[in-house]
Image (cartoon, helix red, strand yellow):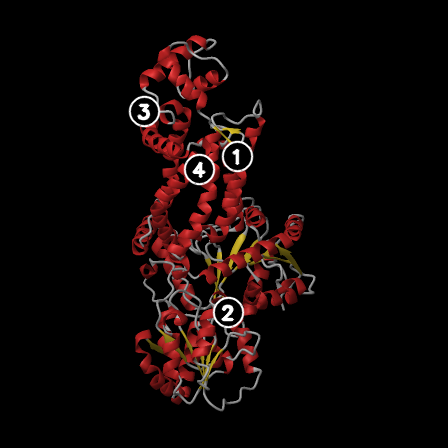
Amino acid sequence: MSYVISAIGRPLGGLMSLIFDLIGNYGLSIIVFTLLTKVILFPISMVTQKNSINMVRLMPEENAIKIKYIDDKEKLADEQLKLYKRYHYHPLLSAVPLLLQIPLILGLVFVIYHPLSYILQFDADVISGLKEWLGTVASGGALEENSYQLEIISRIKDGIAPDGAFLSSAVAGIRELDTSFLGFELSLTPSFKENYILLLIPLFSGLSAWLLCFVQNRINILQITQGRITKTVSTVFLVAFSTYFAFLVPAGVGLYWIFGNLFAIPSMYLLNIVIDPKKHIDYNYLKRMNEQRIEKEREHRKYVSRERADYKRFFTVQDMKLMFYSESNGFYKYFKGMIDYICENSDLVIHYVTSDPNDKIFEDPREQIVPYYVASNKFLIPLFMKLDCRMCVMTLPDLEKYHIKRSRVSKDVEYVYACHGMGSLSTFRKGAFDWYDTILCPGIDQFNEIRATEEVYGTKKKRLVEAGYPLIDEMLEKYESEEHPENARPRILIAPSWQADNIIDLCAEELLDSLKTLDCEIILRPHPQQVRHEPEKFEEMKTRFADVPNIEIQTDFSSNNPIMESDILITDWSDIGWEFAFVTKRPVLYIDTPMKVMNPEYEKIGIEPINRSLRTVLGEVIAPDELEKVPETIGYMLGHREEYRERIAAAFEEHVYNIGKSAKLCGRYVIKRLTPAAKQS
């Protein structure tokens, strides 16, 4: 190892010697040396800057494939490799500057420990003579190879010098050498035993590291994408390391480290000028992501005491029978009918855990419903691990795959999955429902898919309840209780999904161009999440179609929802297609964007997903590259409304269980499982 360090130190020593000859000041020579290394490494920094930009650009796609191939590590690795090649990203390249710093520091340490060789450039014979002399005056013990030259300098400056003409010129050169800088003796190592002024070197080393992190977290493309906790941990580590490191090496190396941190700051600004990340990355998007993350962290801190109290309160309950878990306020609608029936027909207490502190469940006055707020993994994971109740009802797939696990305390908990949509279950992640005991099936398609999946993979058979879909029953009841006057002009509503390559991403403007000539009211109502993440996209769209009187881009979701009053719905794969068609019996025009598939093996079960098979029954399908057919297709659909009404009504009856009775059947199932002897109305 010493040979390697020596080999690195020689060229660096030559450079240091040249700088010292030109400047004549030891400390300034180290600072200039530091600056030169930054200049020399700048082209490499440019390469890593490009690599970092590519990394940030591919993050959304990488996250998607991590989810898609969660159960297939080999396929995940292959897809990641393809993604990296497509974006020209090299995972190890970002470590190159750090790896280059290591030999630079080791080389500089070697140079500072050997000033006779590289600063004064004494011949080997002279250095050997001085070393022999030191051996005669040193008080016992072997000389340390890495520091004997500093010891020679210290002895001679203290007035002890070798005799003889051979070493006289060397002694004179040593006495003239000044290794101090601004009162700091750079050849000494900081310690708490002596030369206390040197303690400022570790202090400044830590402060420079903090300043570097402070700036880096605001302008470095990789740091911008990091969360607050990650940034804090990185900052604390670098500050602590920089401070500790400065206690291990001579103060000259500490000076190099301090100015290395300081020079890195203008280097980052220069990199952002030369290779501007804004030309390749949507900084506004990153800013919004950070703002949302900060807001989420702030909200969590705001509710942390409440969460802790609710978590403790949950485990004070004795003989808990029934628990519901909701990810957010928006999921209550899938439980509502079932919960209403349970409350009206039993005395079962419903322990409702939600990860939304503003969930409307907290406003429910019914004493049978006991709500709890538990959101962070710190409490949510142990809550599920220690769960001890008779039944747990959720809309969350992938039980046991991620942070939500089955109870490790009780093996008798019945886990019930309530579908939060009417689409296919086979396109969910492989094994998404394997750890559930019971599935409340909306229709025959979901029933058949689960059974076929169990057959193909040999998994344990679940209890499948022919339940129906309470949400659509509620929507249907509400719709049929109201009057729906005919629109003065046919209303066409475009309601895309929020998934990769949806209508907005692929063809929204082209679709609007094809529709604007129709004598119809055209409303584009994008998914709220896409509006939240890409508001500028919709502002540009509003500007472009501002002069088209029959087109409206709706991004204010506080206004009345026009979906159920539309004559035709245009969507891609959104579940709103089922709800619109089955409730209104009006047709849907599907734009054939790529289907969202999280299970690449879905075709193994041999059943075509209902998402695809029913589209030509509920309406028509047009490819994104055939949008010129849209006006004619719309005209046909408007002219054959009754035909579509009959087809949709027949499909509704054929594919959905227990229309109008699903809430009652779901609630009755729960009551029967938990109170077998209970009387039900």
Image coords of residue 403 (percent x, y):
50, 49
Q: Would you place residue 572 above or below residue 669 in this image?
A: below
At mark 3, the secondary structure is helix
Marks 3 and 2, Cα distance to the nearest angstrom?
Answer: 64 Å
Pointer 1 residue: 243
For badge 4, the amino acid type reads Ile
Marks 2 and 1, Cα distance to the nearest angstrom?
Answer: 48 Å
Residue 136 in which image quadrant: top left
Mark 1 or mark 4: name the one nearer the start of the chain: 4
Mark 2 or mark 1: name the one nearer the start of the chain: 1
Image coords of residue 174 (percent x, y):
43, 21
Q: Which mark is in front, 2 or 1?
A: 1
Marks 1 and 3, Cα distance to the nearest angstrom?
Answer: 28 Å
Quadrant in which the C terminus appears: bottom right
At mark 2, the secondary structure is helix
* Label 1: how many Cα within 10 Å (few below 14, some 14–19, many 20+): many
At mark 4, the secondary structure is helix
Which residue is at the front of the view, 598 or 199?
199
Marks 4 and 3, Cα distance to the nearest angstrom?
Answer: 26 Å
Please tell me the numbered disc located at residue 528: 2
Which residue is at the front of the view, 201 or 356?
201
Marks 1 and 4, Cα distance to the nearest angstrom?
Answer: 19 Å
Image coords of residue 394 (percent x, y):
53, 58
Q: Which mark is in front, 2 or 4?
A: 4
Mark 1 or mark 3: name the one nearer the start of the chain: 3
42 with respect to 555 (left or right): left
Q: Which mark is in front, 3 or 2?
A: 3
Q: Which mark is in front, 4 or 3?
A: 4
